[in-house]
Amino acid sequence: MQLNEAVAERAPAIEREAPVADVPKLWFDGELIDAGGLHAALNSHALHYGSGVFEGIRAYATPRGPAVFRLPEHLERMRKGAELLGMQFDVAVATEAVLNTLRANRLGDAYIRPLAWYGAGSFGLDVAGHPQHLMVATSATNLHLGGNRTRVSVSSWRRNPASSLPPLKLCGAYVNSILAKREAKARGSDEAMFVDDVGDAVECTGANLFFVRDGAVVAVEHRDALPGITRDTLIALTGATSRPASLQELLDADEVFACGTAAEVAPISEIDAGNAGAGERRYGDNPKTREIAALYAQAVRGGTRHADAWLSVV
């Protein structure tokens, strides 16, 4: 095969994991290949225009062996993004690619990154005539937000509106998150929070938002926010209400947390809302968040009644 391009998440494992493969493998267009030998062509369409779609997925060690959490839901969301870009995307092929890559790399707890993109060709926005590629890479778990209590700044940037870019994992759309994250880091925060023009909370750069008030759990809902799979999982586990919420409601809440595949459940320690003219709020010990985080940790390792529906054994 001509390889002129390619693209070169907390508890301890339940059972002993096999040694990690000496040379990591990537799945690329139907074959498992040593990761170090792959390179992307400099005229790849996705490199210049962001014409790709990806997912972030997690596998966990469970009593039945390594298993991928909610794999069908992740790949169906990826299929929707690919369809918007005019790409062919076979969920069954992508499923086998994920499972085979995990087996080849002998990982239990793992982060999984499938990516579909348009490859080499002439410059210009038209994707017609550009080859389509699919890869899957895996790595040892790396938690977004570090799994720690997180300091959040309200961003001066607005989230891509759904009327301009659909809330899916389209590669080019994440420049928006990069800008917001850079701004938050410059202000001494760990993460950025988007709000809209009327002061409603949207989401963080790579995580959905929840808050707790008087014991009730609320999942922040917004048309511009990614329909998070972890968000959906937590609603199922906790019975949380899903509804729009203002930034002020989050500032008045007892607890606020972010969630996502890579972040899992990340308690927020403070919100700097200076960009929204709303000051600053610090939170306490986040006991309800810890309880929810523990429940989620059980679910991803097969410890709840949802195990058969949510886990794809490797």
Image: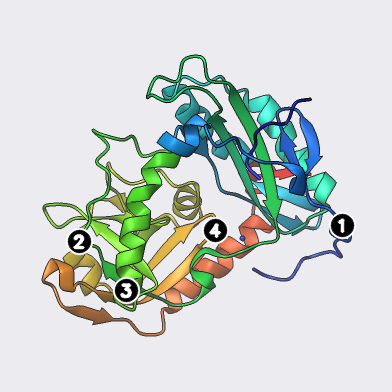
Given contact means CB atoms under 8 Å apart, are the residues at marks 4 and 2 in contact? no
Q: Residues within 10 Å of mark 3 (few under 14, many from 20)?
A: few
Give x and y (percent) for residue 7. Answer: 62, 41
Given contact means CB atoms under 8 Å apart, are the residues at marks 2 and 3 in contact? no
Q: Which residue is mark 3?
A: 186
Disc nearest the viewer among 4 and 2: 2
Mark sitting earlier along the chain (4/2): 2
* Amino acid residing under circle 3: Ala
Mark sitting earlier along the chain (1/2): 1
* Amino acid residing under circle 2: Ser
Give x and y (percent) for residue 51. Answer: 45, 32
Q: Residue at x 73, y 31 (%)?
A: 3
Q: Residue at x 48, y 34 (%)?
A: 46
Label 4 secondary element: loop
Residue nearest the observer in this picture, 105 or 289: 105
User: In 3D space, how far apart are the residues under numbered discs 2 and 3 (Cα atoms)?
Assistant: 13 Å
Q: Which residue is mark 4?
A: 262
Q: How is the image coloured?
A: rainbow
Mark sitting earlier along the chain (3/4): 3
Disc number for residue 98: none
Label 3 secondary element: helix
Residue nearest the observer in this picture, 17 or 124: 124
Answer above or below: position of 51 versus 158.
Answer: above
Answer above or below: position of 86 versus 56.
Answer: above
Given contact means CB atoms under 8 Å apart, are the residues at marks 4 and 1 in contact? no
Q: Which residue is mark 1?
A: 22
Disc number for residue 156: 2
